[in-house]
Image (cartoon, rainbow, N blue to C red):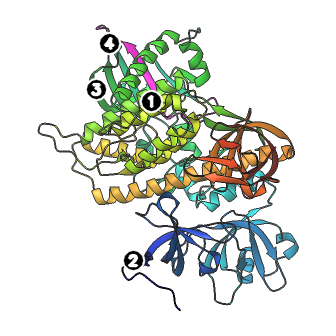
Amino acid sequence: MGKKTKKNSPKKQKKVFHSQEFEGRVCMTREGYAFIRVEGREDDIFVAQRNTRGALHGDIVRVVTTHSRGTGKNLRVDGEIIAVLERSPKPHIGILRIGRHEAWLMVESASMPYDIYIPLSDIEKEFGKDYNPKEINGLMAAARVESWPRNFACPTGTLVAVLGAPGANDTRMHAILTEFGLPYRFEPEVEREAERIPSKITREDIKDRRDFREILTYTIDPADAKDFDDAISWRRLDNGHYELGVHIADVSHYVTEGSLIDKCALERGTSVYLADRTVPMLPEVLCNRLCSLRPGEDKLCFAAVFEIGPKGKVYGSWIGRTIIRSQHRLDYEQAQKMIEGGDGPIANELREAMGVAMALKAERIRKGAIEFERPEMKVVCDEQGKPVDVFQKISKEANWLIEEFMLLANRTVAEFVGKPRRSYKPKPFVYRVHEDPNEEKLHDLHRFAHSFRSRAEKGRFPELTGDTAHDLNTLLASVKGRVEQDAVTMMALRCMARARYTTEHIGHYGLAFDYYTHFTSPIRRYPDLMVHRLLAKYLAGEGPADELLLEQKCRSCSSREQLATEAERASIKFKLCEYMKPRIGESFEGTVSGVTEHGMYVEIEPSKVEGMVLLRDVEGDFLKYDERSFSIYSLRNHKRYTLGTKVRVQLTRASVEQKQIDFKLL
């Protein structure tokens, strides 16, 4: 007799998955699986290696979702790539291997699981038909993937550059620049054009400029700086106020729009600051000589000059071209000693300026500017580029003085052109903008910070008010000095939108400015040079600039800035690995600085170098990631690892090729 069933009992409904198609960018792992990042989607789409269809890291693809698992924050959507729409133009770096009938690039990358086949015709084109394979084998090179033919085990590529012996420091640095599409030398014709620029300042050059050569003027820069693109002039006025001049190198006087140098500068977009060198936007004759505000030399500038009170109130401003002569070249350490009460040629003036700068900073914060306190890693290299020391740079008053005066000049210039006034209509201009943070990410940030609080502290935890700037500053203040400060600061930074250049005036959220631009560094940033040219044009009474052309240049500069930032980070990671490699096997005291489902990041003392403990490498235990509490816990001894947990680790790997540091938990 069969089982009886209740006629009215509802059947369990199975959730139906609706497949969708998207276009996105591939983020690939060394193991071959990928995550597809789709614009507008919070979560990435996971693609197993068997479903990647020849797609590689950085490619634009069409992906179809196939199923999902989990719910809420644990939801994972799986998919399958159905077409590669656009190959990434970014080259891959590796070691050349030349065989009798074929050549390969053995790729060194954490995001490339395959080697690249190189046609021998490329080798002949680079080295000539009579090349010696023994001389080429083992050289570091760059290749760009062009295709992946069916029935081929690996993709086919084109040789982009041969970089040299892999052990040489220059080779490694050039490899990083090549990987991000950044040049590391100027073409000879660009250098020749720069050498032809007249260096002598004529009467014609200064006839319409305000002369500040007799007024106290100084520069404050890092001790190893070679180009000085900003200077401060300072004097007391009879009414108790001060005259503050922010003088910026007038690069536009020397670099003509549309010239070969100008086209090269636009293509670069920015100077690149690697761990052991600077790759300048302009040839050395310009950035280190003609335009650098060196002491004791007459220099042409564009300036914003203010009448300002001791408490930071601005009573008037003037913008225009100047000529200066800096009397003092200070580094930050020298200026800091004078500010702190030490003797010096301009100690009193620096302390006066510091008081004004602190008043400006306090007013910014009162209006909602976000204050991030995250020290920056500094790698000290010797003349051969070998890392000899690592430490964290900490900003002090001397840094703040320069920063506040530069912010004031940038904001004032942006308001001068972009702010509507009686009988004045704003004209097309270049702005530095920063959108408001994503509210959902801000809620996640508070939940993340909340996970560190003990029960006794829960009541005193800052709750959300709806004012994002106030909420962020209150949160950051509440974790100051605590073990979770660095982690919460990093998470807060991830909530922030990326600042960019545009002709659209939308303000700068992080600085709490309605109008903001970049005016103060035309030697190293092309947008600043654009701003100088626009100022000169509008001050001369000329008509509006071509807004569409300006926007195109803004997008290019934003893109180049991002590439430069990625290259700078890669160079620091490389040098940190190089610094740590001789220490493999050594043990260190450290602090958990981050947790993920794959492992925990540990920051060791005293260098603050960060590496990862992979969960799969922990022997004799099973560690599991708890997403709700942002922690990792042990199933064997029930120990929980969260941000700020003190641990002891052993260095097991420092891969200069993949720029990765691994620790073993002791």
In the rendered structure, which segment of residues is drawn in magenta?
A: 223-241
Identify residue for label 2. Answer: 10
- Helix, strand or loop at mark 3: strand
Residue 317 circle label: 3
Q: For the residues marked 2 and 3, what is the alpha-carbon distance in whole angstroms? A: 77 Å
- Indicate the quadrant containing the C terminus: top left, top right, bottom left or bottom right: top right
Q: Nearer the N terminus, badge 2 or badge 1? A: 2
Dot in front, 4 or 2: 2
Dot in front, 4 or 1: 1
Identify residue for label 1. Answer: 459
- Helix, strand or loop at mark 1: helix
Q: Is residue 344 above or below residue 149?
A: above
Q: Residues within 10 Å of mark 1 (few under 14, many from 20)?
A: few
Q: Nearer the N terminus, badge 4 or badge 1? A: 4
Q: Residues within 10 Å of mark 3 (few under 14, many from 20)?
A: some
Q: For the residues marked 1 and 3, what is the alpha-carbon distance in whole angstroms? A: 48 Å
The picture places residue 171, in percent across and down from the top left corner, at: 74, 57
Identify residue for label 4. Answer: 241
Q: Residue at x 57, y 11 (%)?
A: 344
Can residue 632 be seen here?
Answer: yes
